[in-house]
Image (cartoon, rainbow, N blue to C red):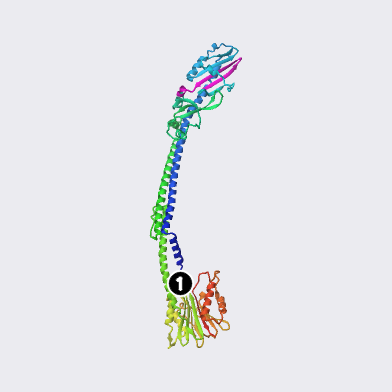
């Protein structure tokens, strides 16, 4: 029985995993898992908040940029519309041969420009043989100054001059000997802001024009975030125009107006196609609601999962403390039917297995203690004192494959210088074989003095009585091989019956080998079996070796049996000067050396009779 190694292992585990160390390990693991669960929830919530903030910021930037873009588009439309004014003025200017006062066709045109472009100004300059003359004298005469960068083909677009922004259209044309220059100017002032507000359906405010710088030294990061990324902020958005510097011709970015962002107008523009609601509005609304619901569900799942994990870990840590203290009857509550529930079930199964193992271990310890007692009792069944014979020595040795064995040898005093030698091998091993062996010995001693017709019963009768008593007593498949012999020390005559036992080896003084073959069935198989006794005289110096099959069936690591040939060779190698006890010891040692490192296969018994020379 292999109980002690497990007991030692369990003891070492109990020492290594004391309650204090187990508690420390559980707390450490719980702390790590708890922090990871909290990290998952925090990261999930933070990512959700960041996504919402990003969407809101993107929406705010789009709304502000769209509001300013609408005004910029309106100004571009005005630039396109103003390009036809200067050429029209130039067409009504006449030529160098006409007096300037006859160009009366300009009045209706100027009346139209005053109505279409409030506060617009126009000038017409003719350079010819008679000098420079202004067809439209007035305050605009100074605007006729032509910068060096201005091309001969003219210019049209927004410009900045002396800090003022305006839309300017200049056309230069050569007519004969005259050079005529027409200029149209529309200031970007309050009147135009009103017109832009009406056209863009938003509030456009006039501000003092200033250059636009993205990275203004006075502009702070918080103001940038507040102005562009926080929804609902009423801070106006700047209308930035790329204008031409009239003095040097360089392109510059100037803030012309400020516009109040309108979420409603932007949503209205995006949501409608003509006068109808666009079909993508409902799709976007459905997708937005779906995303919000999924995100809320995911957050709820994270919180629920974190709570389940924390609860399961608390339960398992408490159960681990109970198990560490030796309370294997503790069971962890199964709260869910998911993997955490499976973990709790597996832990409970482990606790059940440990509890069962604890009970089995206790039972095994009790059984082992009882087997130790049984083994000590069985040892008393073997001869405690070797008989002292005149002119011969006898000895026997046995080794059980388990705690108790089923091999039997015994020396019986028959009186009148006669000794009985019994060697038997009961089928099977362990406790059943030991009980059968004990019964066989008791029956043999009980019938040792039987008589037939007033005379001592022959050996064959004795074996037949044992066969009848044993048959069927322990079941149909139980039997025993037996060698029963009597030895007369006066005559050195050996009378024996071999009932299925391996043939003993008789070694003559000259070293010749004779086998005492079996001529009968093992006892316990057939109740009516008959046996015949044989008789031989052992010469001085001869030796008889009786053994069970466990001796020859012993195997080494290569699964090779010891066998009869090795046994005979071993018997021959033992010199004549060694008594029966020494021969038995050497044979048992030879078998032990042969099967070293392997599990003993069967009970092993050796009985030796050595006749002195």
Residue 252 vs residue 552, the one in the foreground: 252
Name above or below for residue 482 compared with residue 270. Answer: below
Magenta span: 167-194
Considering the whole magenta stretch, tell me its main secondary structure. Answer: strand
Residue 586 appearing in the image: yes
Q: Residue at x 53, y 77 (%)?
A: 586
Residue 278 vs residue 406, the one in the foreground: 406
Where disc 1 sits, the SS reads loop
Name above or below for residue 402 compared with residue 580. Answer: above
Residue 20 percent location from the top left of the image: 41, 57
Residue 2 percent location from the top left of the image: 46, 67
Q: Is residue 221 left or right of residue 571?
A: left
Graded by Cα atoms within 10 Å as few (under 14), some (14 to 19) or many (20 or more), the crowding at tag 1 reads: some
Q: Residue at x 39, y 51 (%)?
A: 311
Residue 387 percent location from the top left of the image: 47, 83
Q: Residue furthest front?
A: 217
Name above or below for residue 402 compared with residue 171. Answer: below
Please identify the quadrant where the C terminus is shown: bottom right
Q: Which residue is mark 1?
A: 403
Residue 457 percent location from the top left of the image: 45, 86
Let me know if residue 475 is in the magenta part. Answer: no
Residue 435 appearing in the image: no
Q: How many marks?
A: 1
Residue 290 vs residue 485, the one in the foreground: 485
Let me know if residue 187 is in the magenta part. Answer: yes
Q: Quarter-wise, where is residue 476 in the image? A: bottom left
Please identify the quadrant where the N terminus is shown: bottom left
Q: Residue furthest right?
A: 177
């Amino acid at each position: 029985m292999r109980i002690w190694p497990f007991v030692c292992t369990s003891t070492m585990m109990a020492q290594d995993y004391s309650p204090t160390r187990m508690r420390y390990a559980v707390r450490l693991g719980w702390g790590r898992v708890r922090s990871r669960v909290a990290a998952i929830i925090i990261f999930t919530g933070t990512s959700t908040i960041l996504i919402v903030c990003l969407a809101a910021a993107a929406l705010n930037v789009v709304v502000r940029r769209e509001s300013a873009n609408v005004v910029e588009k309106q100004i571009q439309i005005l630039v396109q519309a103003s390009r036809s004014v200067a050429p029209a003025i130039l067409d009504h200017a006449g030529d160098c041969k006409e007096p300037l006062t006859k160009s009366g066709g300009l009045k209706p045109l100027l009346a139209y420009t005053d109505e279409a472009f409030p506060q617009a100004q126009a000038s017409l300059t003719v350079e010819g043989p008679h000098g420079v003359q202004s067809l439209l004298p007035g305050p605009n005469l100074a605007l006729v100054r032509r910068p060096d960068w201005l091309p001969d083909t003219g210019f049209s677009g927004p410009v900045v001059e002396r800090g003022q922004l305006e839309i300017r259209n200049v056309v230069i044309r050569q007519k004969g000997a005259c050079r005529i220059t027409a200029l149209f100017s529309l200031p970007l002032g309050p009147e135009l802001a009103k017109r832009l507000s009406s056209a863009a359906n938003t509030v456009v405010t006039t501000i003092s024009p200033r250059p636009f710088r993205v990275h203004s030294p006075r502009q702070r990061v918080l103001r940038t975030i507040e102005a562009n990324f926080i929804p609902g902020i009423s801070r106006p958005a700047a209308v930035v125009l790329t204008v031409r510097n009239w003095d040097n011709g360089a392109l510059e970015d100037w803030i012309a107006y400020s516009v109040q962002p309108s979420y409603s107008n932007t949503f209205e523009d995006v949501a409608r196609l003509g006068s109808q609601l666009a079909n993508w509005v409902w799709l976007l609304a459905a997708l937005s609601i779906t995303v919000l619901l999924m995100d809320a569900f995911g957050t709820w799942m994270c919180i629920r999962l974190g709570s389940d994990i924390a609860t399961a870990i608390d339960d398992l840590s408490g159960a681990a403390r109970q198990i560490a203290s030796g309370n294997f009857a503790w069971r962890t509550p199964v709260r869910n039917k998911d993997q955490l529930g499976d973990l709790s079930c597996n832990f409970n199964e482990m606790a059940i297995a440990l509890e069962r193992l604890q009970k089995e271990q206790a039972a095994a310890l009790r059984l082992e203690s009882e087997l130790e007692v049984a083994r000590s009792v069985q040892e008393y069944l073997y001869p405690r004192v070797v008989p002292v014979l005149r002119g011969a020595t006898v000895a026997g040795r046995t080794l059980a494959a388990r705690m108790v064995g089923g091999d039997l040898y015994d020396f019986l005093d028959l009186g009148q210088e006669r000794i009985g030698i019994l060697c038997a091998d009961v089928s099977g091993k362990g406790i059943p074989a030991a009980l059968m062996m004990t019964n066989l010995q008791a029956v043999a001693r009980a019938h040792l003095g039987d008589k037939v017709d007033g005379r001592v019963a022959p050996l064959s009768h004795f074996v037949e009585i044992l066969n009848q008593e044993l048959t069927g007593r322990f079941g149909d498949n139980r039997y025993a091989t037996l060698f029963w012999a009597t030895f007369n020390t006066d005559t050195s005559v050996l009378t024996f019956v071999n009932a299925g036992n391996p043939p003993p080896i008789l070694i003559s003084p000259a070293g010749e080998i004779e086998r005492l073959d079996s001529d009968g069935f093992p006892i316990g198989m057939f109740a009516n079996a008959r046996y015949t006794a044989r008789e031989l005289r052992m010469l001085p110096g001869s030796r008889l070796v009786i053994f069970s099959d466990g001796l020859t069936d012993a195997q080494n690591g290569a699964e090779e049996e010891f066998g009869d040939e090795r046994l005979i060779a071993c018997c021959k190698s033992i010199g004549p000067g060694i008594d029966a006890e020494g021969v038995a010891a050497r044979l048992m040692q030879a078998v032990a050396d042969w099967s070293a490192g392997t599990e003993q296969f069967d009970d092993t018994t050796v009985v030796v009779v050595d006749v002195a020379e």
